[in-house]
Amino acid sequence: MDRPHLHRHRGALTNPDCRYDRARREAVDDGWGRDWAEDLPPLATEVTVDATRTILTRNQSPDLPFDRSINPYRGCEHGCIYCFARPNHAKLGLSPGLDFESRLFAKPRAPELLAAELRRPGYRPAPIAIGTNTDPYQPIEGRWRIMRGCLEVLAAFNHPVTITTKGFGITRDIDLLAPMAAKGLASVAVSIVTLDRNLARILEPRAATPERRLAAIARLAEAGIPVTILAAPVIPALTDHELESILEAARQAGAISAGFVLLRLPGEVAGLFEDWLGTHFPDRAGRILSLLRQSREGRLYRSDFGRRMTGSGPAAALLSRRFQVAARRLGLVGREAPSLRRDLFRPPPQVGDQLALW
């Protein structure tokens, strides 16, 4: 059986079946009690090599300020219970629950594939977003260093890049990011959902603590790298009261722009989040879900372009207004700033290239 106490330091409490499976499993209490489970080892993280042949993902979403992205990893060990990317694991035949945060896929050929795609005839540069689906600085990056390799390629090509992360590990790559930022080629967004360390430990158990994320903002800012603070996601009746405090703390650390996202619960994330609420906040679960429905026209989630990030209705409008007032007071500009340069893009010479005469 999947039981919450079996999976300490994990976000999901269960491992629901993949939606594409024909069979369905149901946990049943066999009456033997739970004492036997206390001696089980922690749930281990497994990493499999992803044999992908392409690395750039394109999108045409009007909600996103980019049209291409890179995901060095599938799945994310941070284990954020609210992660909107969880349903993608079902496409791999795995569960969006515990599988998503413990059965990961790495793309070690990503730098090589990226360089090949950037050299294609007719390629036109535009900012590449990294970290929009799963975090490129999750713990396994320390060993695989795939994100580092991708940044080395982008730096060599003078290609613009935006990064979104919760990981303090991004500070390792300041030596690459600072020179790129000086040319107008790099910006970073750091996501903070709460400043409460105890709440963060159960919301996003393997992500960097709020204090470490603020420290990362400070280090990046000191190196001249423009940083956006993302108050994301905002969870009504759980973290929404911290919105102004998050923006203020990030501004003091050095952030220059800001954005926010209302909690999104697509696909299986809704059930996982409801289970999590029932275990950790049973007294507030009803209120939180009610406010979400009020902001999603009676549903827990709507995927409509233009409203899926901020919601609709009075509760969502009040949240947006609070954000706008706080951001203006703190001098934080919109999430899209700063713009990045494209005119510096040049594929570096490689062995066998014919040299130009002029």
Image (spheres, rainbow, N blue to C red):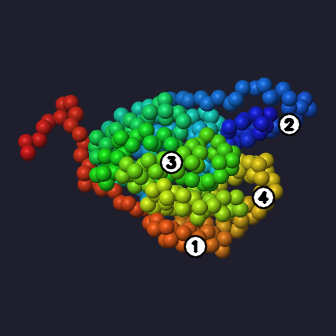
| Percent x, y of residue 261 | 57, 60
**C-alpha separation, residue under disc 4 versus residue under disc 1:** 24 Å
Label 2 environment density (alpha carbons within 10 Å; few <14, some 14–19, many ≥20):
few
Disc 4 target residue: 284
Compare marks 2 and 3 and give the one earlier in the sequence.
Answer: 2
Residue hosting label 1: 321
Mark before the other along the chain sequence, 3 or 4: 3
The residue that disc 2 covers is 28
Spatial separation of the CA atoms under disc 3 and disc 4:
31 Å
Name, please, the residue furthest toward the right: 31
Q: Which of marks 2 and 1 is nearer the N terminus?
A: 2
Q: Where is residue 332 in the image (x, y as percent from the top left)?
A: 46, 65
Q: Is residue 90 left or right of residue 131?
A: right
Q: What residue type is labelled 3?
A: Ala
**Local SS, label 1:** helix
Q: What residue do we see at 71% from left, 36% from top?
A: 8
Q: Name the residue under label 3.
A: 215
Q: Where is residue 137 in the image (x, y as percent from the top left)?
A: 50, 40
Q: Give the structural element (helix, strand or loop) at label 4.
A: loop
